[in-house]
Image: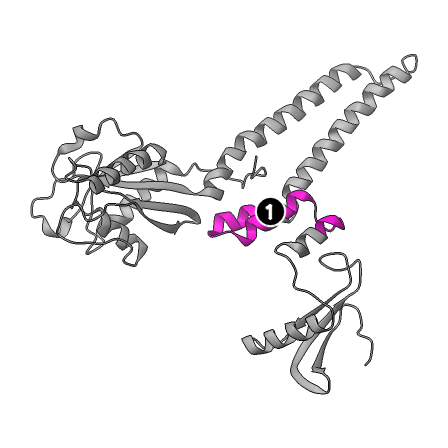
Amino acid sequence: IKKPLPNKTEVVFLTFKKKLIDQAVTTYFKAPKSYTGQEMIEISCHGSIATIKKICQTLEVLGARLAEPGEFTKRALMNNKLDLVQTESLSDLINSETEKQRSLAISNLSGGLSFFNNDINNEIKLILANIEASIDFSDEDLPRNLFKRIKEQNKNIILKIEKEINKSQLAKPIRDGFIVSVVGRPNTGKSSFINYVSKKEVSIVTSLPGTTTDAVTSVIDIDGYKFTFVDTAGLRKHKNKIEEIGIKKTKEIMLKSDLNLVFIEKKETSKYKNIKNKIFVKSKLDKRKNVKNLKGLINISSVTGTGIDKLLNKSKEKLIKRQKHVPILSRE
């Protein structure tokens, strides 16, 4: 068998004990020029489960073992191929669900935070060198106003760090998303709305009030942000223990939510004055004849879709802060 050439792809026949397994493409990465910094061979085989299983079993017979979850990245970290920030960002990238999450993760994976840290460190080293020079060479001709410059440089570094910490508040909603509770009396169109924006039936919809007794969630990507809509039990005087538990859970969710979409039946807005971060919604527009566009109220139909884009845009306006740059600091 000829020795593989580093960083070259080759088409080969994989055989074991004179039996052909597959025709594949292999790439040999010579240390330290590999993902982990160690010797690596990558096999690109045909995608059938049987083929992959056979190759893995053969490698195990030859003394290899399956990697633990994250082991390749751990080895890359231990061999200084990635720093700790990049390792954490890689995890975020793999688990990203929306475009904004992917963008934030890839920014730090490509070294965004590491570059910032290095720049700050270099500026601090320069200040330190100037302070040491003023101590060691106090009788020499040092630059005029040296101490004044040192103080200004120090102040600028603090401002840069504070600016990035303030911008980092934008990272949490990107990474974790927003929780939007859909609340109101039973049979006001809450579940139909959830199903419409989810583009699938995640909630039970009937003409009977009180069919939702537990919170049902649906995760939706809106302009790259993760929105988790929570369909809650209808707020009314409970008729049994199950409803009582569901209503109690609804009130707990409302307190934790970033935004509450309050579905009303008539004009009962005053009943919900204690709810914070809310938008009033009136559904079933397709069934109503006299429609009044009241201030602070959005009319929608979960059958025709009328008004739903307006409601989602209003939700975005309330939750998403405008920013020009992706924050550098993404985690505490």
Residue situated furthest top in the rendering: 139
The residue drawn where x is 69% and y is 70% is 60
- Where in the figure is residue 112, as x and y percent of width and height? 63, 43
- Residue at image coords 36%, 34%: 256
Label 1 SS: helix
- Where does label 1 land, which residue? 89
Query: Is 329 rendered above or below residue 222?
Result: above
Extreme-front residue of the structure: 241
Q: Nearer the viewer, residue 206 or 147?
A: 206
Q: Is residue 276 magenta?
A: no
Q: Which residue is drawn at the image coordinates 30% and 58% (left, top)?
A: 199
The image position of residue 22, as x and y in percent, is 64, 82
> In the shown orientation, is residue 303 left or right of residue 97?
left
Name the kind of residue labelled 1 in the image. Answer: Ser
Residues 193 and 318: in front is 193
* Residue 92 within the magenta-colored segment of the rendering: yes
Among the 4 quarters of the image, the one containing residue 158? top right
Left or right of residue 133: residue 240: left
**Residue found 58% across the figure and 37% down from its top:** 329
The image quadrant where one finds the N terminus is bottom right
Q: Residues within 10 Å of mark 1 (few under 14, many from 20)?
A: many
Residue 62 in the figure: left or right of residue 167? right
What's drawn in magenta, residue-wise?
A: 76-105
